[in-house]
Image: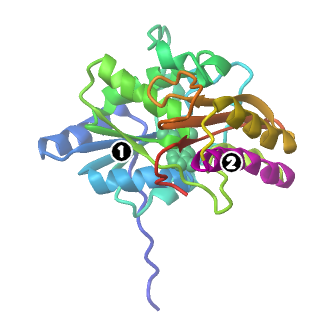
Amino acid sequence: MKAQTTAATPPAFTDAVALGALVADARRQGKPIGLVPTMGALHAGHLSLVDTAARECGFTVVTIFVNPTQFGPNEDFASYPRTLDADLQALAGRGIDAVFVPSTDAMYRPGHSTYVEMAGPALVLEGEFRPGHFRGVATVVLKLFNLVRPDRAYFGRKDFQQALLMRRMVEDLNLPIAIEVCPIVREPDGLALSSRNVYLSPDERRRALAISQSLRLARELVERGTTDARTILARMHERLAADDLRVDYVALADPNTLEPVDVVNRPVVAAIAARVGATRLIDNEMLGEASSEK
Ligand code: AMP
């Protein structure tokens, strides 16, 4: 009988020193180092980043760390899905060289007192509804950058504002790291993949579609010549209300500054955060430019 062959899972490191030695070795060999930061519970959205990084880099590190400092006191840090074994299986055979899975205690040692505070586009949208969120994100990402020292780091457009802020951070802090932003991966019916989708009941899963459909509606309105932001926003709110979603924000914003726009006569990002039951979901779509995603 033929032995079944399964791809080996990539080596997982909890210790930054051991990982650093391996990365340093790859760097000495002239290999471009890629980093894909995640909180685990990996799905095809994460894996698209992973595959792009593995294709473009000579040595690719995926990090899995549910970062406590980016969760608010009433958010889902404790219940966030943690599926390490399945995550490592999902990464097998994808050309990943190392997985970094640090403990919370190692990342935030007693007395930790330094945080990255971002202003400007960090204060609107997610920043307004999740105070402290981007402080936690920027802090942990800068720490991961310092531990791994990648040449390129990969983020998803699903978290549009986060990707924008990571671009700002590397520019503002003179970090020699290229930020690569990958397209949103969606379910066939349009729902953006998210680790939080597992929280949805079947009824909520159906209603959650209102988010991507509202973005699609905005896109169609713009394609048919509507430019008035108020009109588009009203139609988006209507679509979300039809499925009883509780909206944190619906925005049409400049994709670089995230300032609200009145007229959609150039590329604009449409962004939504809404709750379906107890689950808060975000999604976005570029309007006024040829779509690279369907
Ligand atoms: P998370 O584990 O939620 O922190 O996400 C890790 C990375 O995966 C972030 O850069 C996300 O933007 C990205 N990501 C999450 N969901 C998707 C998706 N549906 N499509 C593309 N990228 C995604």
Q: Who is closer to the viewer here, 89 or 208?
A: 208
Q: Kindly identify the amino acid type of the residue bearing the numbered disc 2.
A: Leu
Q: Who is closer to the viewer here, 221 or 189?
A: 221
Res 131 quadrant in image: top right
Residue 183 falls inside the magenta stretch: no
- CB within 8 Å, label 2 to label 1: no
Residue 203 falls inside the magenta stretch: yes
Residue 217, numbered circle: 2
Q: Is residue 19 above or below residue 294?
A: above
* Mark 2 or 1, closer to the camera: 2
Residue at 64%, 17% (x, y): give it: 128
Q: Residue furthest bottom?
A: 1
Q: Which residue is mark 1?
A: 61
Q: Is residue 107 left or right of residue 276?
A: left
Residue at 55%, 34% (x, y): give it: 264
Mark 2 or 1, nearer chain start: 1
Residue 82, given in percent of the width and then of the height, sits at 62, 43
Residue 31, given in percent of the width and then of the height, sits at 18, 47
For label 2, the SS is helix
Q: Who is closer to the viewer here, 62 or 103?
A: 62
For label 1, the SS is strand
Quarter of the image that includes the C terminus: bottom right
Residues under labels 2 and 1: Cα distance? 38 Å
In this picture, which residue range is highlighted in magenta? 202-224
